[in-house]
Amino acid sequence: MGWQLPFIISATLVQHLVDEGLLQYSHGDPKVSFPVPLHFFDKLDIFYNFRLQDLMGLSTTGAGELGRYYYIENLDYDFMGDQIMVTAIDLQYILRRYFILGDETLLASNWSSAGEPDRMFGYLCDETNDRFADGEPGKALIDENILEDY
């Protein structure tokens, strides 16, 4: 994979974009792609966000993953093949990167015991290495001063 950023003259912005890209793809490309029969066109709302359940996904109960949120990147219509090829990006991955406050009475008490839906909300990582106990990258608090660097 090669990034070309020919119109960006800020070295700080280039470094930030490359760091973000490397972090994003460090666990693989968070996309899914699957065909949907064209006759489901009026029964499915696949034009915005959707939740995809992986019955073979890991879970503590063995019932499969409850479902991850995705947003549509591309819909490729194949009228001759009677299908729509859906390509979507993992929305939970994007949301988990930022610090979002949640209701502390409803969330798991710490990152290690939190499930995927809870991990989208605010948990503090170790401030010395910017990582959680399981090694995942910590979340970024949005700082209004970061915009001055660009």
Image: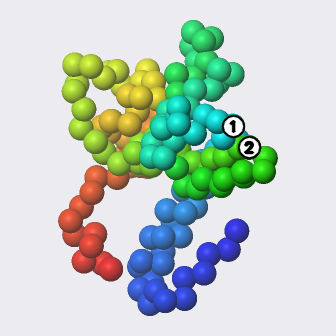
- Name above or below for residue 100 compared with residue 74: above
State the residue at coordinates (28%, 52%).
141
Q: Is residue 76 visible?
A: yes
State the residue at coordinates (66%, 53%).
77
Q: Is residue 18 left or right of residue 96?
A: right
Q: Is residue 81 left or right of residue 39?
A: right
Q: Secondary structure at mark 2?
A: loop
Other-residue count near label 2 (Cα within 10 Å), few / some / many at <14 / 14–19 / ≥20:
few
Disc 1 target residue: 37
Q: Give, as a three-letter code, the residue at label 1.
A: Pro
Residue 9 x/y as whole percent = 44, 90
Q: Nearer the viewer, residue 133 or 3?
A: 3
User: Which residue ends up furthest to the right in the rendered image?
Assistant: 81
Residue 40 x/y as whole percent = 60, 34
State the residue at coordinates (30%, 37%).
122
Q: Is residue 135 visible?
A: no
Disc 2 target residue: 82
Residue 14 x/y as whole percent = 48, 78
* Quadrant of the rendering where the C terminus is positioned: bottom left
* Quadrant of the rendering where the N terminus is positioned: bottom right
- Name above or below for residue 1 compared with residue 38: below
Q: Secondary structure at mark 1?
A: strand
Q: Is residue 119 left or right of residue 29?
A: left
- Name above or below for residue 93 compared with residue 44: below
> What's the mark number on residue 63?
none
Q: Nearer the viewer, residue 8 or 90?
A: 90
